[in-house]
Amino acid sequence: MSFDLQLKGLRALVTGGTKGIGAAVVQGLHAAGVQVMTTARAVPAEPNAGVSYVAADLSTAEGVAEVARSVRERWGGVDILINVLGGSSAPGGGFAALDDAQWFDALNRNLMPAVRLDRALLPAMLAQGSGVIVHVSSIQRLLPLPESTTAYAAAKAALSTYSKALSKEVTPKGVRVLRVSPGWVETEASVALAERLATQAGTDYEGGKQIIMQSLGGIPLGRPAKPQEVADLITFLVSPRAGSISGSEHLIDGGTVPTV
Ligand SMILES: NC(=O)c1ccc[n+]([C@@H]2O[C@H](COP(=O)([O-])OP(=O)(O)OC[C@H]3O[C@@H](n4cnc5c(N)ncnc54)[C@H](OP(=O)(O)O)[C@@H]3O)[C@@H](O)[C@H]2O)c1
């Protein structure tokens, strides 16, 4: 059976596309024949041939405006907008360790880039009567970990609620809006974290992975997802083959969330 995703020639902007999940998404879309533009604060030393890179800090309104300007100058608009950028560098220590700066950092990394970029690029999608937007959230919006990710989890919850509201508003006008919520994904950054935890606990990398999995209450599948697996899900969801899917959240967590 052939399964043509019918993505060839479409125009996509992917945020956070130089590492981890975003880099896998960029690669997957490019391989599917999509014209891809991506953003990060730094252009990689070995950029993906055929992919356009725009260096900008998307935690600021100016950075978002710069990226939106590049999209308009090059293409006029996009067919696919994938908001991958997000993350947290908050310290451990629960609520008391989270000052205003930590809270604003969580919102400026996980909520506002998507809100601002959607606002800038949606009008052209609405004018053409088609488009798809993905917001990469996290299972932590359902399963917050109080030791160090309260602000991150709350920002992802805000992103998810915003995404649902947007889908209600623009799906009737031809634009699909979706959420993809990964559990633990074995990116370069999380490999480094597992290695650090392993060293601290005097164990090996597999032991470090077990520490992370235990902190999540276990992963029934027994392993984290691979960035490529998250990218494959997103690539399908943005394709015309998923044309009747909108307003929904898609968990990819090996069964981590223990409830229905
Ligand atoms: N990894 C996981 O286990 C996991 C689990 C659940 C959800 N998620 C979510 O999945 C998404 C991707 O996570 P990841 O772990 O794959 O990310 P990552 O490996 O940390 O990569 C982050 C990307 O965003 C860029 N970036 C960071 N800060 C930026 C800024 N201020 N402005 C513009 N670009 C910026 C980075 O490049 P520069 O550093 O050069 O800017 C990089 O390309 C995030 O939304 C995250 O919350 C991840």
Image (cartoon, helix red, strand yellow):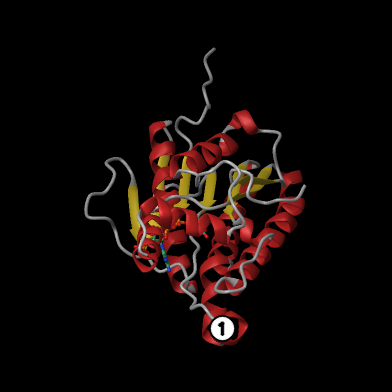
Under circle 1, the secondary element is loop
Residue 155 in picture, x, y percent from top left = 62, 69
- State whether residue 92 is above or below residue 210: below
Residue 128 in picture, x, y percent from top left = 61, 43
- State whether residue 243 is above or below residue 200: above
| Other residues around mark 1 within 10 Å, as few (<14) / some (14–19) / many (≥20) | some
* Horizontal side, residue 183 vs residue 142: left or right: left
- State whether residue 30 is above or below residue 122: above
* Horizontal side, residue 24 vs residue 217: left or right: left
* Horizontal side, residue 65 vs residue 112: left or right: left
* Residue 18 in sight: no
Residue at image coords 45%, 43%: 226
Residue at image coords 47%, 66%: 64
- Read off the residue under disc 1: 98
Residue 171 in picture, x, y percent from top left = 73, 46
Residue 169 in picture, x, y percent from top left = 75, 54
Residue at image coords 62%, 64%: 156
Farthest front residue? 202
Residue at image coords 68%, 56%: 163
Farthest top residue? 1
* Residue 170 in sight: yes
* Occupied quadrant, residue 207: bottom left
* Occupied quadrant, residue 104: bottom right
Q: Quadrant of ligand 1?
A: bottom left
Closer to us: 186 or 4: 186
* Occupied quadrant, residue 158: bottom right
Q: Quadrant of the N terminus?
A: top right
Closer to us: 150 or 137: 150
The three-letter code of the residue at mark 1 reads Leu
Farthest left residue? 45
Closer to us: 253 or 181: 253
